[in-house]
Image (tube, grey):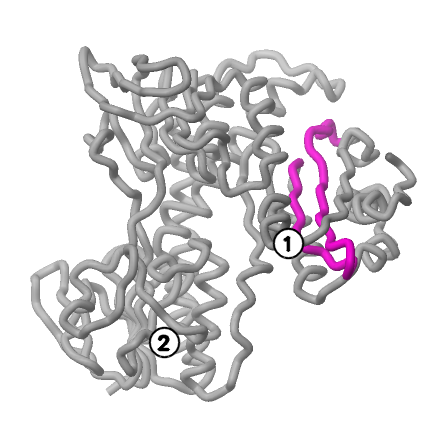
Amino acid sequence: MYDIVIIGSGPGGYVAAIRASQLGKRVALVERAQLGGVCLNWGCIPTKALLKSAEVYNHIRNASDYGIDIAGITSPDMSKITARSRSIADTMSNGVAFLLKKNRIELFEGTGSIKRPGVVNVRSGADNSDIELQAEHIILATGARPREIPALPFDGEHIIGYHSAMTPDHTPESMIIVGSGAIGCEFACFYAMMGTKVTLIEYLPNILPLCDEEVSRYMERIFRRMKINLLTGTSVREAKVAGGRCVVEVEGKNGTQRVEAEVALSAVGIKSNIEDLGLETLGVRIERDKIVVDSYCRTNVMGIYAIGDIIPTPALAHVASAEAILCVEAICGLSPKPIDYTVIPASVYTFPEISLVGFTEREALVKGHELRIGRFPFTASGRAAAAGERDGFVKLIFDVKSDKLLGAHLVGAEVSEMIAEPTIAGAMGMKASDLAAIIHSHPTMSESIMEAAADALGEAIHK
């Protein structure tokens, strides 16, 4: 008999298991694939390893800009780049295994499903044997997988998902990427920097549709400079493989046309892994492919909880981890504070990076705020100039009446490391005057946040 059984070992599941163990609970964790889930094995971590290789390659190609001449550089070795990425993913997964052992969490390898309230069935993938785990509380953390659309069916060779895109054995001559969210844009950058001719197709009018429109427009210019062909406001009608090539028929502003490439990558979103868990039999409420929960991740069935990508909150690893801690602490009677989803940071690891928190300008206007906006370009930053990374800007959105920060949108090198400051500012209700008064180290990229806040007040010194 366990106190808590968790199905899924991604950044939601394994964090929930560790926190529950810290609080003195006997915990069982069920996983059918690799420890760490998609994030550690096929998402956040290995993609960043690929992108780092692309960044290093780009620096080598442009070393002369820094006064360094390098001779004899030919081309990247995709097999070694892929091997490095997989090695890093394996290291992180092994790290999760170490943490589970350290925290005395019992791991069961197999496919978990809820047989009835308080009982989880685990079917072993090795011999199809079944065991039952009993627990008062069951947490579902089964994550998501790439969404497949009928017009672009995966064949694993010419029409692929992100798993295949992360393990190439060569650099494709050309690639079509359908979907310009974070996954699509990151792969567009990686492959374009490796020398692939990339066409990026987006159904909506702008790439990165969840970002602030000013950010989206700026990144469109960056992508065109990278020679990425952008087809926005364009839908995919059909994809065929002919003569070893992928031919995609699209419809957009200029009518119907055909786009041809060696390979096509579908990056149109994710599908929740909620099938075959026993939810329908139990009567767990589901809406639009997501499990409905309250502010403490409790479903409508007592003793069953859900966290991460399978509930209607931002599908981000750090959100799943926060929900895991919240859920477990509530189970253990600690009365944690519910998550404020209006101050969740997010990053897109393109070149340059994008980071955001809070409302976009459009969202803030729709909510009825009168806005005061401060901006600071990295072209005016001494640190950015010294690093040769002058692309990008900081945009801060404040409410005129309260002077409080409503949203922050950053584009630039390493801005994923800068978003914590405006996230804290938003969570603490800080004002433009507060941010402008904070003394930042010089020269740094982060002092651009201070400058943008000062700009909102009409007091920017260096702009």
**Badge number at residue 100:** none
| 402 part of magenta stretch | yes
- Compared to residue 120, the image places residue 368 above or below, namely above
Q: What stretch is highlighted in magenta?
A: 387-412
| Amino acid type, mark 1 | Gly
Q: In which quarter of the image is residue 459?
A: top right
Q: Mark 2 points at which residue?
A: 298
Decide which of 55, 357 is in the foreground and name it. 357
- How many C-alpha atoms fall within 10 Å of the one at disc 1: few (<14), some, or many (≥20)? few
57 or 114: nearer the viewer: 114
- Marks 1 & 2, CB-CB < 8 Å contact: no
Q: Which residue is drawn at 48% across and 17% down?
A: 75
Q: Where's the C terminus, which quadrant?
A: top right
Q: Where is residue 393 in the image (x, y as percent from the top left)?
A: 71, 36
Q: Dot 1: what SS?
A: loop
24 sits to left or right of 277: right
User: Counting residues from the N terminus, which is met first, the one under dot 1 or under dot 2?
Assistant: 2
Q: In which quarter of the image is residue 296?
A: bottom left
Q: In which quarter of the image is residue 221?
A: top right
Single out the residue that lies furthest toward the left. 128
Residue at image mark 1: 368
Where is residue 199 drawn, in percent x and y?
41, 20
Between 16 and 268, which is closer to the camera in this rendering?
A: 268
Q: How far from the left and from the top, in percent, is residue 425?
A: 72, 60
Tell me how far mark 1 sits from mark 2, CA to CA.
Answer: 32 Å
Three-letter code for the amino acid on which mark 2 is drawn? Arg
Closer to the camera, 432 or 34?
432
Q: How crowded is mark 2: few (under 14 residues within 10 Å), some or many (20 or more)?
A: many
Per the image, is 327 magenta?
no
